[in-house]
Image (cartoon, coloured by chain):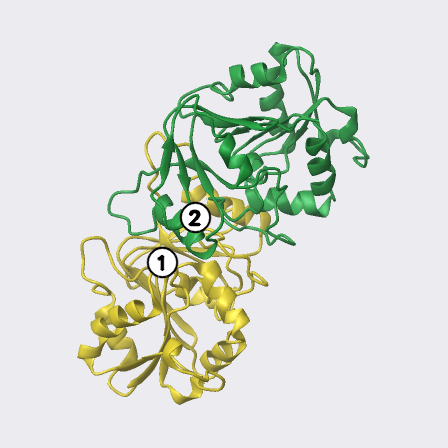
Chain colours: A green, B yellow
Amino acid sequence: MNKRLLLLSNSTNPDENYLSWPKSHIKDFLGSELKKILFIPYAAVTISYDNYFNAVSGSLKSHGFQIESIHQIEKIEGIIQNYDAMIIGGGNTFRLIDLLQKKKLLEPVRKAVENGMPYIGWSAGSNITSPTIMTTNDMPIVEPESFRGLNLIPFQLNPHYTEATLPNHGGESRIMRINEFTTINQNTYVVGLPEGSLLRQEGAQLYFMGKGNCTVFYHGTIPQLFKDGDDMSWLLKV
Amino acid sequence: MNKRLLLLSNSTNPDENYLSWPKSHIKDFLGSELKKILFIPYAAVTISYDNYFNAVSGSLKSHGFQIESIHQIEKIEGIIQNYDAMIIGGGNTFRLIDLLQKKKLLEPVRKAVENGMPYIGWSAGSNITSPTIMTTNDMPIVEPESFRGLNLIPFQLNPHYTEATLPNHGGESRIMRINEFTTINQNTYVVGLPEGSLLRQEGAQLYFMGKGNCTVFYHGTIPQLFKDGDDMSWLLKV
């Protein structure tokens, strides 16, 4: 089966309604056939799963999708196959991967997507599709069993990518952080996805869509820039 | 023996010379008796240990300190006791704790400081004196064996603390990140140290010194603010 991924940098741009910018992309990705969608809210830390789920389903249900949240299901073993697609939302990447590990969901999710189940993620939910969670921006508020991710793509994602820095602040810029990663991990590509942008995989094809530059880092090379509509399929073969 | 710690938020303020702002604090902390100092550069990722050490010793040697870097010593087992004080510099916290674990230095460093060896750290070097590294700002570019820190203080430090945010960017603010930590870790204090500030411990006494507000977070409470010269000794008993 063709692997199908919609990896969003972020859910919502500043001063816009919740899930506003990616809505048309989600609709186009899911089409009219895929009705029953599983939502996984485990990245949430400071909001309740109920509130998180209500925000997501409130934004997407007008398109005729039937969304259910895994936190409202009593026995989760084996349930993924009952759905047509899945959405993993953002929050804290360490919290998300820790709960997926503890609930033994990492392998079932990975297998379902490898077998063709469409996957939508944003922020932490996009981060974890990489080989590891090592290019997250999040604070390591819990210690997961391992940094291994879903490994659905062969490169690392950095969501909320920005080259902006705080004035009069000496902390590392995002570029410095990613350069630290590529210095230690010299054989791994890192893709910086600015807010309001996404990667869409359809089998052997990968495209960048949205605002700003998709910035690709690799040790010892100058970062490569890509823009809306660019074919990034070469990244699936690295 | 009295525990003695000088925990700096950062090495250098923007547009200032390297180690400029903390120099007088370091001099006062070490006094004129402590001459032989061990430097540990393992947090460095994108600069060489030689360059890092040269910058640090170049800045401090005019005060008559004799500084040696651990990376220039062939056999490091048991060497800590040959020194009067130690400095652990900043960089990447995950890299630093990973190398301290791999080189089996975590316990010797902890014991030496518990037994009275003065400790100076900045950024990552301050972070690791907490019970865990869970309030670092750094990217998890390597996977350490464990998130456990030196546990020399009973609370978590967040260096480079700032309440500033990037305009038109939806990523989490520092306050949101620390609130995520205290939501999951409800019995742990987090101390935000702005750049240009420090905590100094002398046995049972702890003081905040420097620019801006020292901001103390605890789950379910309003953050408490402290300023230059404030006695923070109560934090040693939490």
Examine the rendered structure and indicate whether residue B121 appears above or below residue A6.
below
Depth check, front residue: B88 or A113: A113
| Earlier residue among tags 1 and 2 | 1
Please provide percent x and percent y for residue A16.
Answer: 43, 20
x and y, in percent, of residue B38 in the image: 36, 80
Q: Identify the residue under disc 1.
A: B46
- Residue at (63% x, 13% y) in the render: A31
| SS assignment at label 1 | loop
User: 10 Å neighbourhood of mark 1: few (<14), some, or many (≥20)?
Assistant: some
The residue where tag 2 is placed is: B223
B42 or B113, nearer to the observer: B42
Can residue A200 be seen at all in this image of the molecule?
yes
In the foreground, A75 or B161:
A75
Q: How many marks?
A: 2
Q: Classify mark 2: helix, strand or loop.
A: loop
Q: Inspect the image, locate mark 2, and give the three-letter code of the amino acid beneath it.
A: Pro
Q: Chain of mark 2?
A: B
Q: Is residue A11 visible?
A: no
Q: Quadrant of the N terminus of chain B?
A: bottom left
Q: Residue at x 37, y 44 (%)?
A: A174
Tell me: A178 left or right of B145: left
Asked if residue B38 is positioned above or below residue A42 in the image, the reply reads below
